[in-house]
Amino acid sequence: MMGRASQTEQTWVLGLDGGGSKTALAYVSGAGEVVGPFSAPGINPFDRPDWEAVMRTFLSAHPAPGPLTYASLGLPGYGESPAISARQADVCADLLPGCPHTPMNDVEAAFVGAFAGGPGALLLAGTGSMAWAHDGARQLRTGGWGEGFGDEGSAYWIGRRALGLASQALDGRHQDAAFAQVLLTPVLDGPPTQPGLLTWFYAQGHARSAVAGLARSVNALAEDGQPTARSILLEAAQLLAQHVTATRQGLGCPGLPWSYAGSVLGSRTVLDELITRLGPPQPPALPPLGGAVFHAATRAGFDTTTVWRTHVRAALLHPSDSTPLLQEQP
């Protein structure tokens, strides 16, 4: 006779990965079933006045598919401003009444996913940039100061640097006029001009995301051999490497393994330069959303085996290709 499923197999956890440009959530059961991921706009409270409304609408639109036993929410900016963090915690409590949950910094959630709870240094470079490290006893973060005077090497930094050089090329202060043409013509739907560029920039509803989005174009140009685009990415990699080096030095662990997350690390140019400077990375065990899911699952008492993690990773990264996790029959 077949036994009944265990209690944890019939319950669910929630993982949320909030970012500057995009937010994602997924539900995972103790049996390894994945519902999601779902996506929404960014919820960074420092530059998104509507972050709370977005978060409330997002979770309301995607309720739990069954009994929810734990939720872990990676939130941009959490822990960086007492007043804002308190409000983030209040919103989480309001949205998850009666459900045990943990709000955490989104980079911490990505760290948990990359190392599946083990030691290391996680370099995250998406819209912003930061490194989060833990040696098993001590924790340290570097970067994450925001676009005003930080976020070096991030997608926003790359886009901002590209716009700066392109604008200088338009008025004759930079010699690579071709760079301005190939970068800006698709964006402006025509030959770039000063009025056209200014009009585009100030028409953006969320300039930070729009500027960060240019990093994809810079990477494509670098892959085609465009010299200015490649120099921007190499400089970004140099700045990002400093984050990991600083965490290793701060913890006194020069050999601390490093891993990565975020759209910028999808650039082969950036990743190759980081490997040259830091050594080979440890492939992330789970993506950032998976880190929030893994954190919640461990708190809920799920059996987070390597098989479970591998399945969850595949389901989160390639949801259309995911197949149910096979369970051993009792």
Image (cartoon, rainbow, N blue to C red):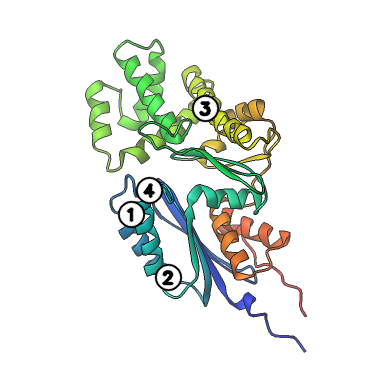
For the residue pair 265 and 92, the one nearer the viewer reads as: 92
SS for callout 3: helix
Q: Dot 4 corresponds to which residue?
A: 81
Q: What's the CA distance linking mark 1 and mark 4?
A: 15 Å
Q: Is residue 58 visible?
A: no
Q: What's the CA distance linking mark 3 and mark 2?
A: 39 Å
Q: What's the CA distance linking mark 1 and mark 2?
A: 17 Å
Mark in front: 2 vs 4: 4
In the rendered structure, which amino acid carries the disc numbered 1?
A: Trp
Q: Does 233 appear above or below 108?
A: above
In the rendered structure, which amino acid carries the disc numbered 4?
A: Ser
Q: Residues within 10 Å of mark 3 (few under 14, many from 20)?
A: some
Q: Dot 1 corresponds to which residue?
A: 51
SS for callout 1: helix
Q: Does 234 appear above or below 287?
A: above
- Ranked by sequence position, the earlier of labels 2 and 4 is 4
In the rendered structure, which amino acid carries the disc numbered 2?
A: Leu
